[in-house]
Image: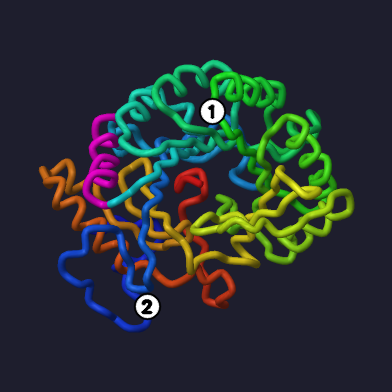
Amino acid sequence: MVAVPLGIPLVRPAPAGSGAVRPAGLSGLADQHGRVATDLRVSVTDRCNLRCTYCMPAEGLPWLPSGELLTDGELIRVISVATGLLGVREVRFTGGEPLLRPGLPAIVRATGARTSITTNGLRLGRLAVPLAEAGLGRVNVSLDTLDPLRFGALTRRDRLADVFAGLRAAVAAGLAPVKLNTVLMRGVNDDEAPALLEFALEHGYELRFIEQMPLDAQHGWSRSEMVTAAEILAALSSRFTLTPDPSARGGAPAETWLVDGGPAKVGVIGSVTRPFCGDCDRTRLTADGQVRTCLFSVTETDLRGPLRAGASDDDLAELWREAMWGKLPGHGIDDPAFLQPVRPMSAIGG
């Protein structure tokens, strides 16, 4: 059963190229291109308490009706199918802003896998300890600027002090290593790359720069305006000596470099100009119970409907396997026919 975002034609996720039939007996989330998904990204809400200019308009977005969201119990059950039947080893909770989900500590506690969370940090100051006690392993915190005025302009909220407080609370709660996620935008904050790395080194955080992706609600992304991975590395190299990290990257999205000989590292996620699709090990679940095989999918596989209609765990697992078998070999951003997903990042999960 497939549910598709509004405005997208009903197209079943289909394998590209060979049209190979999925072999019987596959237990994990394999696709026909040799990849196996073991990392699950779970969006627990589409709501957010910031209005970042590169993500959504100032007035926000129409949020999903509460009845369409998976309940805490439903989320826990679907995650347990992934970790118990499908070989998922790591679960990352995302949003929107995941700390807006009231039952998140209980959901984390019930998750039988390594857990992490990507957050804007605004509520982390009060929730770091409860989440750590529930078993959360670590946090990624979005931080695009160190300047309070610039932060206010970017996010349309004067909350940078809360982000810093959240970072301190995460360290104190043992949610290490704390990672920072930064998106650089041309003419906005692209002058801050060295300062952000200096800040991360000073506080013991691990910094990851992320190329801006075509996932904004306004559909205003422009490749020509995007700050590329090469430009980011050039900016960092003006102050630091970067050498390639000799450790294996595996399925990690970030290429990493040793900073001034190490052991500190910095990463760059070049999703657009240096795609890592061939090693992708991720599968995604939206807050309303849809499986997405890729951030840029234009089709989704519905688990909520079958779940509420009485499907067994084995039934849900089989739907998930079928969806992942049809995963495309790449996101296709370089293809002239590329279509940006209707759902923005806030409704997909990072």
Look at mark 1 in the image and give the residue it sits on.
175
Q: Which residue is mark 2?
A: 16
Left or right relative to 217: residue 19: left
The x and y percentages for residue 289 are 30, 45
Tell me how many marks there are: 2
Quarter of the image containing the N terminus? bottom left
Q: Position of residue 262 (x, y in %)?
A: 74, 46
Magenta span: predominant SS is helix
Instruction: Please state which of residues 136 and 73 is positioned toward the viewer in this rendering.
Output: 136
> Which of the two discs, 1 and 2, labels the residue nearer the N terminus?
2
Residue in view at x 72 percent, y 61 percent: 228
Q: Looking at the image, can residue 153 be seen?
A: no
Vertical placement of residue 250 versus 198, above or below: below
Tell me: 151 left or right of 315.
right
User: Residue 348, position in %: x, y?
Assistant: 45, 48
Q: Residues within 10 Å of mark 2 (few under 14, many from 20)?
A: some
Q: What amino acid is labelled 1 in the image?
A: Leu
**Label 1 crowd (10 A; few <14 / some 14-19 / many >=20):** many
* 295 part of magenta stretch: no
The quarter of the picture where residue 243 lies is: bottom right
Q: Residue at x 71, y 43 (%)?
A: 264
Residue 169 pos. (x, y %): 60, 20
Q: Using the numbered discs, state the Cα–Cα distance from disc 1 to disc 2 in whole angstroms.
A: 40 Å
Q: Which residues are magenta?
A: 72-86
* 57 or 273: nearer the viewer: 273
